[in-house]
Image (cartoon, helix red, strand yellow):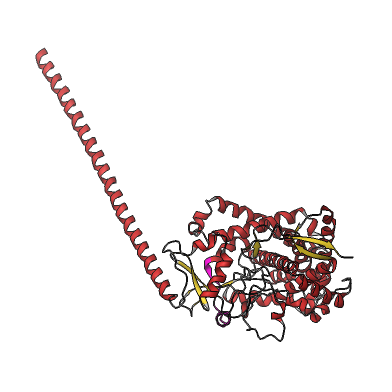
Amino acid sequence: MLREGQQQSGTVRESQQSSSTCTMSVSVLDVIRFLGGVSGLLQVASVLGLVLLLLKAAQLYLYRQWLLRAVQEFPSPPSHWLFGHMHELQNGQELQELQKRAEKYPCASPRWLWGSRVSLVVYDPDYMKLILGRSDPKSDGSYRFMAPWIGYGLLLLNGQTWFQHRRMLTPAFHYDILKPYVGLMADSVQVMLGKWEELLSQNSSLEIFGHISLMTLDTIMKCAFSYQGNKQADRYSQSYLQAIRDLNNLVFSRIRNVFYQKDIIYRLTPEGRWNHRACQLAHQHTDRVIKLRKVWLQEEGNLEKVRSKRHLDFLDILLFAQMENKISFSDKDLRAEVDTFMFEGHDTTASGISWILYALATHPEHQQKCREEIQSLLGDGASITWDSFVLGTTWTRCHTPPCASRRHCDSIHQFQVLAESSASPSPSLMDAPYPKVWPNPEVFDPSRFAPDSSQHSHAFLPFSGGSRNCIGKRFAMNEMKVAVALTLLRFELAPDPFRVPVPTPRIVLMSKNGIHLHLRKLL
């Protein structure tokens, strides 16, 4: 009995050991099969990834070949298959390189930013007339990088929505609206000149662009946004202007960086986060402007007072449009138009005024001629009026700021066209760099803009052309005339030979090291 029990017990232990061994074998086999399955999946994923990569490479290759065929009629300097002409943009000589192109290659020249992106730099007036005479949409390529900042207002909109907004805002620039602005512009300029007079005792050159930016912001706030106060002494203005300077640089930097094209990648980079903070600061400024005006309109009697006006200011037109049809004109649409005009209404004119004053400082004979004409029209400048602008000749010829625009033209092989009508490395920054159109383009010669000159209608386009020309061009020209006239009546300008400005293209033409002038108060 005992022996049988022992045998049975041994049999059970052997059975358990055998069962345990089988279980372990099954587990190992399962792990092996699982790992084999994962390895297979990884192999399949690798093959699919490689196939997708090859398909993308083939797509880019075919797209590049299509672009090459599209621009084959236009010669250009040799370009790298991957980096394009990026070396021209990174040596600090971009404007000089542009002038070399204009001299060497007729009409237009392709510029490759990298292997699959090309812009056609156009500098022939007949080409410009053809392009701007069409109704092609703005290019999505670079302009979209400005959308987080200024939204989809007049600058970025296309199609019927653009047409509706343009038609709605056109009355804000009627002559009857612009005429009384002259006095407001003069007040802002006099505040700036008073600050300059206080700084003269330091016996050093003055960096003028920062002061002029504050003045133009003050002007646009008073004229278009019905602001009561002095933005030149407002601490919020400084933070807004710094945000605008940052965004100018960041947008331009992003356009030229192949790795920053995708939003999801750009947001994760230090520059992307910096861009986001700068946009927030800019939006805080415009939101404050909109809120203050809304609060003022809600006060008793103010709404009826504004309604009774024959012509409404820029911001009031937007606010009344929203009141009447909030569904089709949202808060987002309202802020986009305010952001757009706040930037375009101060930064572009600040650049134009700064370069005009520098050009006159470096050409004292033209400066004196302008001053004499202004004195004959305005006396001491105490009573500057709208009618004064109609009479000026030499004075008026000196006022034309640079600009650039982009169009997507279906008629020219479906590629992006970059129309840079006035990007000149000349210190005058007035004349287009195309010798075929402008003899001696390096010479500052206001007489080339005389009414009886035989220049092409599209040889110089400071406010673009066609249906999408600058809606605020009269406002900008008036502001520049007022600023230059009052400055020349009060100061004699001379350049700082130790700090010569270095022009650099941004959204507007800037100087890498500022614009420094010596000022001498006139008796």
The image shows residue 256, relative to residue 42, as above or below, that is: below
The residue range painted magenta reads 125-141
Disc tally is 0
Q: Quadrant of residue 153?
A: bottom right
Q: What residue do we see at 74% from left, 56% from top?
A: 237
Nearer the observer, 419 or 104: 104
Nearer the observer, 245 or 42: 245
The image shows residue 33, relative to residue 64, as above or below, that is: above
Q: Quadrant of residue 278?
A: bottom right
Quarter of the image with the N terminus is top left
x and y percentages locating residue 498 in the rendered image: 70, 57
Quarter of the image with the C terminus is bottom right
Q: Is 249 on the left-hand or right-hand side of 216?
A: left
Does 133 lie within the magenta span?
A: yes
x and y percentages locating residue 492 in the rendered image: 81, 65
Q: What residue do we see at 33% from left, 60% from top?
A: 54
Nearer the observer, 436 or 10: 436
